Amino acid sequence: MTNDTAALNSAILRAFALRRRFNSKIFGILSFALVISLLVVYILQMQEATEANFNISVYEKKLTDLSMSNQGLEADFLQTNSLANLENILAVSQYEKIDKISYIQILENQMVVKK
């Protein structure tokens, strides 16, 4: 019985050692795969963050350019629509200054009819 028990114990110990070695290999492979996948996700996220920062700087530059353009357009608009400029345009267009204004008076009870 002692031989049988010893043989059984050694077979059980070998099975546990084989299972432990197999489990540690699977654990190692899964751990390595997890580390690699997390590294890939990290790289992709850093690429997206870098691209977003670049886009922000491009949009800020466009915003400053548009602001400068807007200021120039406002200055042109104010210069074009100034009262002095309007007087110059009227003088060049040969309009005459009117002294007296006469309005057409319409009586309340009369109506124009087309025949």
Image: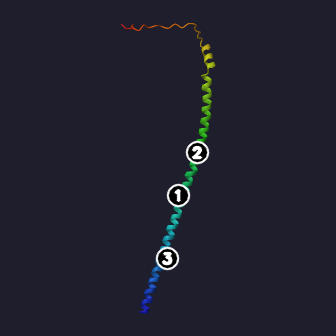
- Report the residue at 46% width, 86% height from top: 10
Apparent side of residue 10 relative to residue 73 in the rendered image (left or right): left
Q: How many other residues sit within 10 Å of disc 2, few (<14), some (14-19) or many (≥20)?
A: few
Q: Amino acid at mark 1?
A: Val
Q: Is residue 59 above or below residue 26?
A: above
The residue furthest left is 115
Chosen colour scheme? rainbow
- Report the residue at 61% width, 37% height from top: 65
- What is the distance, in whole Å, between disc 2 and disc 3 at their CAs? 52 Å
Earlier sequence position, callout 3 versus callout 1: 3
On-image quarter of the C terminus: top left
Earlier sequence position, callout 1 versus callout 2: 1
Q: Residue 51 location, x and y as percent?
A: 57, 49
Q: Amino acid at mark 3?
A: Arg
Q: Point out the frontmost of discs 1 and 2.
A: 2
Q: How many other residues sit within 10 Å of disc 3, few (<14), some (14-19) or many (≥20)?
A: few
Do the CB atoms of the residues marked 2 and 3 lie less than 8 Å apart? no
The residue furthest front is 108
Q: Residue 61 location, x and y as percent?
A: 61, 40
Q: Amino acid at mark 2?
A: Ile
Which residue is labeled 2 in the image? Answer: 56
On-image quarter of the N terminus: bottom left
Q: Is residue 28 above or below residue 102?
A: below
Which residue is labeled 3 in the image? Answer: 21
- What is the distance, in whole Å, between disc 1 and disc 2 at their CAs? 23 Å
Which residue is labeled 1 in the image? Answer: 41
Q: Kindly state the secondary structure of the residue where label 2 is placed.
A: helix
Q: Which mark is residue 72?
A: none
- What is the distance, in whole Å, between disc 3 and disc 1 at their CAs? 30 Å
Q: Point out the frontmost of discs 2 and 3.
A: 2
